[in-house]
């Protein structure tokens, strides 16, 4: 299956993350949604709220890629992993072009770790591509 034949997409308004921070619920929210590695990545990111929104959007997009939440699903079952120096599989090129074509900026590619066999796709790897779309973060996931 080519990477662009099946995708999951999600959009997270940055205002949603800002509202959580404003209510003082950031730590509880992030601990529930993010892995320790993602927490560290967000804390070190030039825009921590943007990074947190990217993690949430990616996790939601993976759920959509899978066709819904598997039984027993937990947020830690899906985690953003390393950013490949080569930009990921060549099949992601058209997907990146499509995102940039609709005005998505600052596109980043990540490999996703699926931590439970219940979340297994049968594919070799799951990839996430995310970026900014005005005041939102959009994430697209696919497998290769």
Image (cartoon, rainbow, N blue to C red):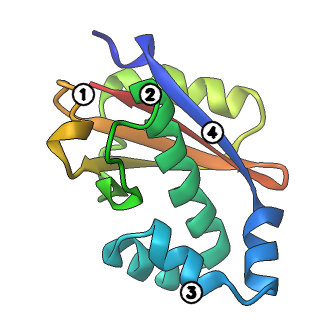
Residue at x-position 84% and y-position 50%? 134
Residue at x-position 42% and y-position 10%? 5
- Say left or right for 50 vs 33: right
Q: The C terminus lies in which quarter of the figure?
A: top left
Which of pointers 3 and 4 lies earlier in the amino acid sequence? 4
- Say left or right for 48 vs 55: right
Which of pointers 4 and 1 lies earlier in the amino acid sequence? 4
- Say left or right for 53 vs 35: right
Give the structural element (helix, strand or loop) at label 3: helix
Which of pointers 3 and 2 lies earlier in the amino acid sequence? 3
Around disc 3, counting alpha carbons within 10 Å, would you say few (fewer than 14), some (14 to 19), or many (20 or more)?
few
Around disc 4, counting alpha carbons within 10 Å, would you say few (fewer than 14), some (14 to 19), or many (20 or more)?
many
* CB within 8 Å, label 1 to label 2: yes
* CB within 8 Å, label 2 to label 4: no
When asked about the image quadrant of residue 125, the answer is: top left
Residue bearing the label numbered 1: 121
Residue bearing the label numbered 4: 10
When asked about the image quadrant of residue 49, the answer is: bottom right
Task: Tell me: residue 33, above or below residue 77.
Answer: below
Task: Tell me: residue 69, above or below residue 106.
Answer: above
Q: CA distance from mark 2 to mark 4?
A: 10 Å
Residue bearing the label numbered 3: 27
Around disc 1, counting alpha carbons within 10 Å, would you say few (fewer than 14), some (14 to 19), or many (20 or more)?
few
Give the structural element (helix, strand or loop) at label 2: helix
Which of pointers 3 and 1 lies earlier in the amino acid sequence? 3
Residue bearing the label numbered 2: 65
Q: CA distance from mark 3 to mark 4?
A: 23 Å
Residue 117 screen position, x and y as percent = 15, 41
Q: CA distance from mark 1 to mark 2?
A: 9 Å
């Amino acid at each position: 299956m080519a990477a662009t034949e099946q995708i999951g997409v999600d959009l997270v308004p940055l205002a949603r993350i800002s509202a959580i921070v404003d209510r003082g619920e950031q730590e509880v929210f992030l601990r529930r949604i993010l892995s320790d590695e993602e927490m560290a990545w967000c804390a070190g990111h030039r825009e921590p709220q943007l990074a947190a929104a990217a993690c949430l959007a990616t996790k939601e997009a993976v759920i959509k890629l899978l066709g819904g939440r598997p039984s027993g699903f937990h947020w830690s079952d899906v985690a953003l992993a390393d950013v490949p120096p080569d930009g990921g599989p060549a099949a992601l090129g058209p997907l990146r072009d499509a995102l940039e074509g609709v005005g998505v900026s600052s596109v980043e590619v990540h490999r996703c770790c699926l931590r439970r066999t219940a979340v297994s796709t049968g594919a070799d790897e799951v990839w996430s591509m995310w970026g900014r779309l005005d005041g939102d973060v959009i994430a697209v996931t696919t497998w290769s």
